[in-house]
Image (cartoon, coloured by chain):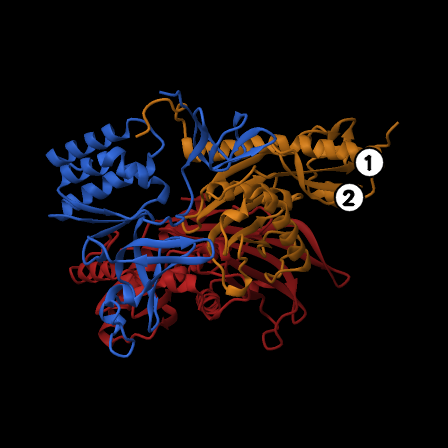
Chain colours: A blue, B orange, C red
């Protein structure tokens, strides 16, 4: 086990000296490593990185994202990904190879304002992200409460091997769909259960940089399900 | 022997009671507006300036986008009631120039290559102006940009120095700006030790110029501490340094 | 319309349905009752360079008004009256879909509605603002800057303008050898009443007060009504493509007068004590 030093940083903070193979949210200038984001710096044997606490969502291939349909042409939908890029969902992805703009009506599938769970199929620096709905659990989301969190908090909301999200789901019996882009949809058996889930998600959003968060969320959930909502 | 005018009360003390190397009171707050991706508010002497950052976002009109990096756009604007005599709300030539040099002062710190085909908008709104509003605006803008989570090599911090009654002084106020001999606003990246904005209005000898620049940079270093405190306060509050389990 | 604007105006279907279902039951997303307004906070004298100023936060909507007082020539048809002009500007930092540039039709409507409320209520006693009849009068400029948009800019801007005027210090000018001289003394600005506007929106057949931005983006129409301290209606603006029945309009008049009185006492307290 290598020793990892953690420290709160802001851009321009000096986090280490020397050469590191892997740098994430950090820059090397004359053999000194500086943070480029507000976040938590981790310096290990081979890498120095800053886990950011703010910033917009930058798409990555394979990410599950929850998007809002904002426009469509005869051939494709345009989706708001809560990012600096808008997503492109071609009609073929839904209608298949036989798709014909004269026969198939895109608005019958996804209308403007609909929320759609998608996967990022392709993305590079030169074009807008290509989305797909062709996988299990993807497609239009028909019900639930929409919660927006900072995309930087998503890893914490999921937790180690899903520990955080499992804790919330098990205690509230809610189903929570998490988009890597910071859009979360909660559906559940009752308004009260949804309310408690949303409260837990807000706790993670606000306290992502703090320690023993899972325990505190657990305490809140157990307190709430057995009695009052604090 | 220096001849004292009305801007220096006695040797080393200025008309507003400050020492020659003393800043006016400065207060910076991060995250003050709800809608902006990030925002900051600065009080620098009598200046009250609100800054908001939007972006990175899609560029409109599309032809303004750059294939390999983000476009940084900056607007410095003064409210009609921010000055002694009501100002027309339409941007003046002065505001357009300050918008440009502010953008150029911030740009070197930003890693714009990380956000191709996007735009980053910085809005600097002067609600009340005093001497040195461009420096205060740039300082607050750097805090808002860091708050927005845009990759930055360093913060940018700004402060002016100048010449008043034949004395080189730090952080010129409104009166000293109008009646003084020279004003030198400087923006500076404190870790990289690079100047990103420099203007001079007035006459300085070579020696005075060097002294003035050194003094402005020392002011920048003080302002930088306040920028860092504002960001730490917003994100980490009174939390102890992290040691335990993060997940 | 830019893409950014489009995306912000589109409310998710889920959200729209949720809002509509709640409204029919007499509830709102943020837990308010139908005619309940959001928390109102007023701070005055925040800009020392202005003769009067106020910052108003109404929920998440935030605006600042500043008053500058100067002298000028009266309008030809009103030689015995001072001049009051009110302007409003939506700053580009106020939301992702406000852009720099000359004011658009929405911003111009906003400025005119705020101006009309103050003018038509005869809040300012313009007859007391004359220095030399027909030649030199006081000129009061009220400028409202919108800092953060979350719906109902009309009311937030009008409360800010009124609060700034209520706390504005009128410089004592005198005329010496035909020139205006500032005596460096001041008196309170002469006011007669406190105009208060209340904006109600219609979504489906439900009428709500003080709409948020999200509510505005699905509303059919709105009515902004300004009342004075005696309970008279002094300015009205209907906006949006929706229609109203006479019954609905009567309901709006009633609510505006009651709500107006509540808000007027908040304005009074804030401008007497500096802030609330």
Q: Quadrant of the C terminus of chain A?
A: top left
Q: Quadrant of residue A133?
A: bottom left
Q: Chain for mark 2?
A: B
* B155 or C48, nearer to the observer: B155
Labelled pair 2, 1 in contact (Cβ < 8 Å)? yes
Looking at the picture, how far across and down is residue A139, in whole percent?
Answer: 23, 58
Which label was assigned to residue B83?
Answer: none
Q: Is residue A213 visible?
A: yes
Q: Chain for mark 1?
A: B
Judged from the image, the secondary structure of the residue bearing numbered disc 1 is loop
**Residue drawn at x 41%, y 58% as measured from the top left:** A128
**Residue drawn at x 43%, y 25% as measured from the top left:** A44
10 Å neighbourhood of mark 1: few (<14), some, or many (≥20)? few
Q: Earlier in the sequence, mark 2 or mark 1?
A: 1
Question: Horizontally, is B112 left or right of C7 in the view?
Answer: right
Which label was assigned to residue B179?
Answer: 2
Label 2 vs label 1, nearer the camera: 2
Q: Residue furthest front?
A: A97
Looking at the picture, how far across and down is residue C141, in whole percent?
Answer: 57, 61
* B136 or C229, nearer to the observer: B136
Q: Residue furthest right?
A: B1
10 Å neighbourhood of mark 2: few (<14), some, or many (≥20)? few
Disc 1 target residue: B5
Judged from the image, the secondary structure of the residue bearing numbered disc 2 is helix
């Amino acid at each position: 086990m290598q020793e990892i030093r953690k420290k709160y940083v802001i851009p321009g903070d000096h986090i280490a000296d020397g050469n590191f193979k892997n740098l994430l949210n950090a820059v090397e200038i004359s053999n000194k490593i500086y943070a480029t984001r507000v976040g938590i710096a981790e310096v290990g044997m081979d890498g120095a990185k800053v886990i950011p606490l703010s910033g917009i969502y930058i798409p990555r291939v394979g990410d599950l994202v929850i998007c809002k349909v904002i426009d469509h042409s005869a051939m494709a939908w345009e989706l708001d990904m809560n990012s600096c890029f808008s997503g492109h969902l071609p009609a073929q992805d839904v209608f298949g190879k036989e798709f014909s703009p004269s026969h198939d009506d895109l608005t019958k599938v996804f209308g403007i304002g609909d929320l759609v769970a998608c996967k990022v199929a392709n993305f590079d620096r030169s074009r807008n992200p290509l989305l797909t709905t062709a996988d299990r659990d993807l497609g239009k989301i028909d019900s639930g409460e929409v919660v927006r969190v900072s995309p930087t908090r998503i890893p914490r909301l999921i937790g180690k091997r899903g520990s955080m999200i499992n804790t919330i789901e098990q205690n509230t019996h809610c189903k929570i769909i998490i988009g890597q882009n910071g859009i979360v949809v909660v559906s559940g058996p009752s308004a009260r259960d949804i309310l408690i889930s949303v409260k837990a998600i807000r706790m993670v959003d606000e306290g992502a940089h703090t320690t023993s968060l899972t325990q505190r969320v657990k305490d809140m959930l157990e307190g709430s399900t057995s009695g009052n909502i604090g | 022997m220096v001849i004292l005018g009305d801007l220096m009360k006695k040797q080393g003390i200025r008309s507003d009671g400050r020492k020659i190397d003393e800043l006016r009171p400065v207060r910076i707050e991060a995250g003050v507006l709800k809608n902006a991706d990030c925002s900051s508010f600065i009080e620098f002497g009598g200046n009250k300036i609100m800054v908001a950052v939007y972006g990175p976002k899609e560029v409109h009109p599309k032809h303004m986008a750059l294939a390999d990096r983000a476009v940084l756009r900056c607007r410095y604007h003064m409210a009609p009631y921010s000055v002694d005599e009501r100002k027309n709300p339409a941007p003046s030539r002065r505001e357009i120039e300050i918008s440009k040099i502010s953008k150029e002062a911030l740009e070197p710190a930003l890693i714009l290559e990380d956000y191709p085909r996007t735009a980053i908008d910085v809005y600097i709104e002067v609600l009340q102006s005093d001497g040195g509003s461009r420096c205060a605006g740039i300082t607050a803008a750097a805090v808002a940009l860091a708050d927005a989570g845009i990759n930055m090599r360093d913060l940018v911090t700004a402060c002016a120095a100048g010449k008043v009654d034949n004395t080189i002084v730090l952080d010129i106020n409104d009166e000293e700006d109008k009646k003084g001999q020279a004003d030198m606003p400087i923006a500076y990246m404190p870790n990289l030790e690079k100047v990103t904005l420099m203007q001079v209005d007035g006459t300085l000898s070579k020696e005075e110029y060097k002294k003035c620049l050194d003094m402005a940079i020392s002011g920048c270093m003080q302002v930088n501490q306040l920028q860092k405190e504002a960001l730490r306060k917003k994100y980490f509050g009174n939390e102890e340094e992290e040691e335990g389990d993060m997940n | 319309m830019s893409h950014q604007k489009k995306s912000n105006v589109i409310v998710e279907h889920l959200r729209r349905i949720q809002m509509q279902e709640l409204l029919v039951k007499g509830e709102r997303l943020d837990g308010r009752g139908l005619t309940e307004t959001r928390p109102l906070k007023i701070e005055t004298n925040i800009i020392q360079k202005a003769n009067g100023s106020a910052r108003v936060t109404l929920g998440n909507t935030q605006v600042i008004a500043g008053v500058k007082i100067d002298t000028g020539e009266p309008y030809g048809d009103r030689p015995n009256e001072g001049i009051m002009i009110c302007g409003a500007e939506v700053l580009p930092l106020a939301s992702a879909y406000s852009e720099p540039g000359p004011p658009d039709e929405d911003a111009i409507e906003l400025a005119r509605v705020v101006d009309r409320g103050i003018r038509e209520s005869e809040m300012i006693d313009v007859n007391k603002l004359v220095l030399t009849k027909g030649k030199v009068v006081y000129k009061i400029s009220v400028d409202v800057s919108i800092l953060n948009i979350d719906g109902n800019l009309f009311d937030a801007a009008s409360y800010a303008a009124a609060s700034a005027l209520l706390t504005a210090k009128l410089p004592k000018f005198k005329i010496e050898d035909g020139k205006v001289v500032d005596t460096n003394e001041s008196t309170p600005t002469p006011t007669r009443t406190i105009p208060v506007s209340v904006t109600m929106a219609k979504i489906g057949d439900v009428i709500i007060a003080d709409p948020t931005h999200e509510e505005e983006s699905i509303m059919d129409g709105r009515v902004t009504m300004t009342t004075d301290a005696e309970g008279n209606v002094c300015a009205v603006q209907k906006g949006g493509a929706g229609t109203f029945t006479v019954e609905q309009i009567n309901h709006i008049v009633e609510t505006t007068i009651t709500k107006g009185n509540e808000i007027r006492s908040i304005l009074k307290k804030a401008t007497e004590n500096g802030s609330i």
